[in-house]
């Protein structure tokens, strides 16, 4: 019983260790304007990788499953829902141009 309890307590440790690691920022191409996602900033604010990486950090970003595995919602739909919901709570940008940079349109991207 003690070992099980210890295992359950230590299970989140690798995720907490990742709190200050990972990409500083990366871009999502969009025909509505590139979105620069400040990963490190969001990581520090949220404090728990599982909020976004709900299948585990080793699975990578949303686009590794969403839009790839049939039956799962598209990446853009997941991002819009997840991001907007959090932004409403913490008063982050909720208008399109708050995240999408209309100066950096990419009309070659049609999955959004």
Image: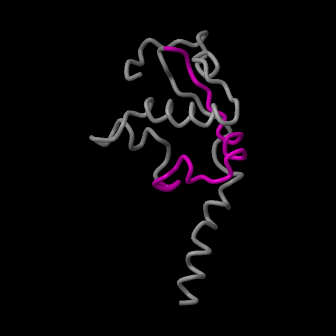
Residue 76, x across and y down, in percent: 45, 29
Q: Residue at x 66, y 24 (%)?
A: 93
Quadrant of residue 15 within the rendered picture? bottom right
Q: Residue at x 72, y 46 (%)?
A: 44
Q: Residue at x 68, y 39 (%)?
A: 24
Front residue (pair 37, 1): 1
Residue 51, x across and y down, in percent: 56, 49
Q: Residue furthest front?
A: 89
Please determine whether, in this image, residue 50 is positioned above or below residue 74. below
Quadrant where the C terminus sits is top left
Residue 34, x across and y down, in percent: 56, 20
Front residue (pair 30, 85): 85
Residue extent of the magenta highlight? 32-58
Q: Is residue 98 magenta?
A: no
Q: Residue furthest bottom?
A: 1
- Classify residue 62 as left or right of residue 5: left
Q: Residue at x 39, y 39 (%)?
A: 66
């Amino acid at each position: 019983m003690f070992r099980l309890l210890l295992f359950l307590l230590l299970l989140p440790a690798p995720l907490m260790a990742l709190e200050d690691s990972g990409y500083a920022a990366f871009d999502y191409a969009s025909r509505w304007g590139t979105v620069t996602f400040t990963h490190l900033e969001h990581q520090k604010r949220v404090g728990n990788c599982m909020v976004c990486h709900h299948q585990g950090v080793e699975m990578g970003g949303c686009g590794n499953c969403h839009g790839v595995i049939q039956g799962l919602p598209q990446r853009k739909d997941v991002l819009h829902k997840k991001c907007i919901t959090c932004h409403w709570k913490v008063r982050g940008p909720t208008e399109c141009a708050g995240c999408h940079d209309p100066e950096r349109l990419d009309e070659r991207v049609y999955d959004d």
